[in-house]
Structure formats: C-alpha cells, structure tokens
Image: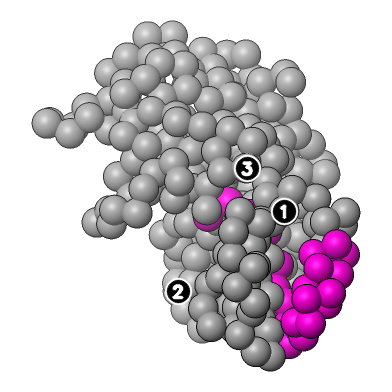
Amino acid sequence: MTPVLSVAEAHKRFGDTLALDGAELQLGAGEWLALLGPNGAGKTTLVRAVAGRVRLDSGRMTLLGRSLNDDSAHGNERDQLGVVPQDIALYPQLTAAENLRAWGRLHGVPSAAIGERVRWALDWTGLESRAKEPVKRFSGGMKRRLNIACGVLHRPEIVLLDEPTVGVDPQSRERIWEMLEDIRGDGASLLLTTHQLDEAQQVCDRIVIIDHGRVIAAGTFEELLRQTIGAERRITVSLDAQPPREFAGERWQIADDETLECRVADIAVELPSLLSELSAAGARVADLHVDAPTLQAVFIHLTGRELRE
C-alpha cells in the first residue's frame, strides 16, 4: 500500500488533557479508511492536526510525500487536501450555486474552471433544480450534500470527512455514500470519522480504532474480528415447547424456557446438522435467527462499555 497520508508518533496536550499519545495511521492511495473512537479518544484532534487546525507538540505527518511538520511547511502542502466538517459550513443567505462559487474561489479553483465545477457539483449532489434557491430553505440532507461538494470542489486527492451523514434521512445517507464512492472512483483517498459503525463496516476498506490518544487496533473488518471476538455466528432457535434437558451443555445453551443458543464457525456446514439434531429429538422450530459479528461488538470489546461524555 502506497501511503498518501502518514501520521507517526503524534502527541498533543491541551493543558492537563493528553489528547494524542503517540497516535499513528496511514491512508493508502485510493483507500477508504474509517477512524473510529469514543468521545474524547483523540480522533478529532488527529484530523484537525492533519488539516492544519491544530499544531502537534511532536510527531511527523506527510501528505503525498511532503512533510506537514511546522518547521518545513510553506503553505501549499495541503493544496490537495479536502476537508468536510461535521458542522455545516455554508452561507445560508446565498444560493447553492453562489455557495459553490464562493468555496471554489476560496479553494483556488481558477476562474475559467469555476462554472464547470459548479455544474458538476450540482449534478453530483442532485441539486440542479435548487441551484438558485437560498440554502436556508434546504433540508438537512440537502445541506449535507452541498457541504460535501464545497469541500471537494477543487478536486483534492485526499478528503477528510467528519461525520458526513449525521442527522440525515436514509435516502440522503445512501446518496452521500454513492457520491463519495464516485470521487473515490476518480482517484480520491478518503479518511472518515463516524459514530455510525454499521456504515463504516459496510463502506470502508480498513478501520483504525483510537482510544486515549493511541491507536489500539487497525485492519480490515475481518482482521479485527480475528484479533478480538472471532468470526463465529450466534444461532438463536425458538421452539414451540420447552427444550429437552439433554440440549443443555457445551453445544447448546438454554437461553430461556423455549429458546436455545449456540455458536458456529461455519454456518453453511453446521446449521443443517443442528436442525437435524433438533428434529431427531422431537423439537419443533418456531423461529431461527443468526447474528453475525459486527464492528460495534468489536468496538465495545476494545473500548469498553463506559459512557464517554
């Protein structure tokens, strides 16, 4: 994997609070990477450091092979970086097209290219028919899509996305993922922070979990499973009567009066024999449910259940 963004041994303290304690990550070319962590884990500080909004106390950062360290940066190292903040960064009194033009100029898009880029963004976000309407009239999902477009109008090679789907309806969320997959198909590399763990599991190539300012796990979802809770499925079977006592043991666990549970490594191989076993014992299955391991279960396993405020 060729890294387009690299962070090593990042340290940052705010007074008595140690926000980053040696955090490291690498974003590969064309990769979609999720940066996850509980509240206060350090992920926002890390993203802000990459974006140039926080100065690290120590550590090394490179973007497309160029150093982002304060003593060597000259102002153009982040030209190929796009930042999409969680807070909506739009001018409510301006129209969608006017917002795009303003942000395009702020990002240095040449005057000759602004018109084409605005047309592309309106088509990309599905807002062509609302181009001349003030943003203050837009729904939350429309604002989110426009917010993303303003952050990538200059065609950056690396995009930082902070909770890009927070507070939007399922249709808008689906459209946003399609939009982001489009720009990744054009060569962009994406770094995503989100609390929507199911979405991160579905869309991201690799996952980095940070806690207490350190990276505590990194890899694909399958790799994280192997490192933590394992890939076994839990099978829950509801019967039409109380299960026979002989089912209590290592293979089956009696969950309640009419429910059995067990775990299997290969559901395609093991499930038929399990059902045959139940049938041979005279038990009739009323319902069956298979729970696959999830990123949320991995996350809780690694970071605990304690509330973070």
Looking at this view, name the residue that lies furthest to the left: 16
For image coordinates 73% across by 77% down, the residue present is 288
Q: Is residue 121 left or right of residue 96?
A: right
Seen from the viewer's position, the closer of residues 58 and 9 is 9
- Which callout, 2 or 1, points at the residue further toward the start of the chain? 2
Seen from the viewer's position, the closer of residues 122 and 241 is 241
In space, the residues marked 2 and 1 are separated at their CA atoms by: 57 Å
Q: In this view, does 292 lie to the left or right of 274?
A: left
- Residue topped by disc 1: 264
Location of residue 5 with respect to 31 vertically, above or below: above
In space, the residues marked 3 and 1 are separated at their CA atoms by: 11 Å
Location of residue 84 with respect to 68 vertically, above or below: below
As helix, strand or loop, the secondary structure at mark 3 comes to loop
- The amino acid sitting under disc 1 is Val
Question: Quadrant of residue 28 in the image?
Answer: top right
User: Is the C terminus in the top left, top right, bottom left or bottom right quadrant?
Assistant: bottom left
**Pointers 2 and 1 in contact (C-beta within 8 Å):** no
Q: How crowded is mark 3: few (under 14 residues within 10 Å), some or many (20 or more)?
A: some
Q: Is residue 216 left or right of residue 21?
A: right
- Which callout, 2 or 3, points at the residue further toward the start of the chain? 2
- Magenta stretch? 272-296
For image coordinates 49% across by 72% down, the residue present is 167
Comparing labels 2 and 3, the label whose residue is closer to the camera: 3
Residue 133 makes an appearance in the image:
no
For image coordinates 12% across by 31% down, the residue present is 15
Q: In this view, does 122 lie to the left or right of 85?
A: right
- The amino acid sitting under disc 3 is Gly
- Residue topped by disc 2: 93
Which mark, residue 230? 3
